[in-house]
């Protein structure tokens, strides 16, 4: 069976003091990794401190993005080598906000996924359709294309460790989540695409998360679905209480 994952994406929120307070509150309350994997993807500035605070906890720390190159003249960027070096375990790749506002493309997403594996980081790859693609019933084609492109050239033994977050763009931060059954069908499409590329046994092992206005009160409806293995959560991951409630539901 696939172990559920609850991953928080703080985006550009919190001060350092708030990050430390959250980490101290949450690290005691999370279950063991065989029950639910818990991840907080924090702003890059806080990562080292948060990794150090959680060495005795099963709460894992993730980055929200990274560059595909190891080093070089890339002002302001984050190196995968540096992330690995400070003990970061996960990295979100291809979040729709990065695609929309920071020019991430399917090609750069694929390069970053390669770089993540090269440096021992687990990629949480985001895919999802826009509102107009949803209205035109193009969701299945869009997510299949994005997932195939993201995983191009990745080895089967690596693909099984990938985490894929299906995040309909129209549901992110809008308070308007997808219907759980519909999200489940899209996740089934993703799993079928994985099976076609990498075989059934690999596809069965990949964790698929839903993301988009997940809250403690709708989390159960997503966790009940057979293809959904957890959630990538923005707003509701910012408070320790609500993060822990999501984790409780995922158990
Ligand atoms: C996200 O940022 O990935 C996200 C799903 O945000 P929210 O939960 O706030 O919709």
Image (tube, rainbow, N blue to C red):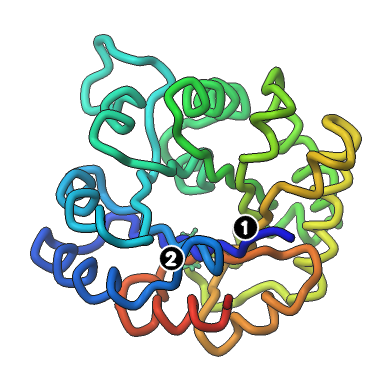
Residue 139, x across and y down, in percent: 80, 53
Residue that numbered label 2 is attached to: 234
Q: Nearer the viewer, residue 215 or 103?
A: 215
Quadrant for the C terminus in the image? bottom right
Q: Which mark is residue 146?
A: none
Judged from the image, the secondary structure of the residue bearing numbered disc 1 is loop
Tell me, yes or no, if residue 96 can be seen here: yes
Left or right? Give the position of 229 relative to 113: right
Label 2 near ligand 1 (CB < 8 Å) = yes
Q: Is mark 1 within 8 Å of ligand 1?
A: yes
Q: Which residue is mark 1?
A: 167
Q: Nearer the viewer, residue 118 or 209?
A: 118
Residue 212 to residue 167: above or below = below
Q: Where is 152 relative to 225, above or below?
A: above
Instruction: Tally the numbered discs.
Output: 2
Write the residue at 69% across / 72% down. Answer: 178
From this viewpoint, is residue 232 visible?
no
């Amino acid at each position: 069976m696939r172990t559920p994952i609850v991953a928080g994406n703080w985006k550009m929120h919190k001060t350092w003091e708030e990050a430390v307070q959250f980490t101290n509150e949450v690290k005691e309350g999370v279950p063991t990794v065989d029950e639910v994997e818990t991840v907080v993807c924090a702003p890059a500035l806080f990562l080292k401190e948060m990794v150090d605070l959680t060495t005795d906890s099963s709460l894992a720390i993730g980055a929200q993005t990274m560059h595909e190159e190891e080093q070089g003249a890339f002002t302001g960027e984050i190196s995968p080598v540096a992330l690995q070096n400070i003990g970061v375990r996960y990295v979100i790749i291809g979040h729709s906000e990065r695609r929309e506002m920071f020019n991430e493309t399917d090609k750069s997403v694929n390069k970053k996924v390669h770089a993540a594996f090269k440096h021992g980081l687990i990629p949480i790859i985001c895919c999802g359709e826009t509102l107009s693609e949803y209205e035109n019933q193009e969701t299945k084609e869009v997510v299949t294309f994005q997932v195939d492109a993201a995983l191009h050239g990745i080895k089967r033994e690596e693909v099984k460790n990938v985490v894929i977050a299906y995040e309909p763009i129209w549901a992110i931060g809008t308070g308007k989540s997808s219907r759980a059954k519909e999200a489940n069908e899209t996740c089934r499409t993703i799993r079928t695409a994985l099976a076609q590329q990498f075989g059934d046994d690999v596809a069965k092992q990949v964790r698929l998360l839903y993301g988009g206005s997940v809250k403690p009160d709708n989390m159960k409806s997503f966790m009940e679905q057979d293809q959904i293995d957890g959630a990538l959560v923005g707003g509701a991951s910012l408070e320790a209480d609500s993060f822990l409630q999501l984790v409780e539901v995922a158990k």
